[in-house]
Amino acid sequence: MADQDIFDDIDQLVTEERALRDRSTANLGLTAEERSRLREVEVRLDQCWDLLRRRRALGEYGEDPSKARVRPADQVEGYQS
């Protein structure tokens, strides 16, 4: 997967996230299914950004960026600030 593919995924996910959030405010909430989908989109966005950061770090240190893989949601979501 190339960086542009990741950016394309991010663009699609952001569009879906915005649509869900707009529906949430327009309809005073989301259905359980929509809330679940919103959470999935948020997690997937975090995974995409994580993958992009790791690809760039590998390239910066002379390694092959294509070695980076999407990490599991529980690993990406478990970051501490």
Image: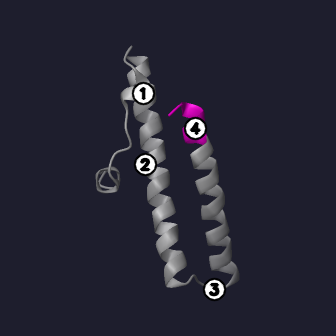
* First of labels 3, 1 by sequence position: 3
Q: Which residue is drawn at 67% across and 85% down?
A: 27
Q: Name the residue under label 3.
A: 28
Q: Do the residues labelled 3 and 1 touch (CB within 8 Å)?
A: no
First in sequence: mark 4 vs mark 3: 4
The type of residue carrying mark 3 is Leu
As measured in the structure, the alpha-carbon distance from the residue carrying label 2 to the one carrying label 3 is: 29 Å
- Measure how far apart labels 1 and 4 are at the Cα level: 12 Å
Give percent across and percent down for residue 41.
Answer: 51, 61
**Label 1 sits on what residue type?**
Ser
Which residue corresponds to mark 1? 66
Query: Secondary structure under badge 4?
Result: helix
- Residue at position x 58%, y 47% in the image: 9
Q: Mark 2 points at which residue?
A: 47
Nearer mark to the viewer, of 4 and 2 = 4
Q: Residue furthest front?
A: 1
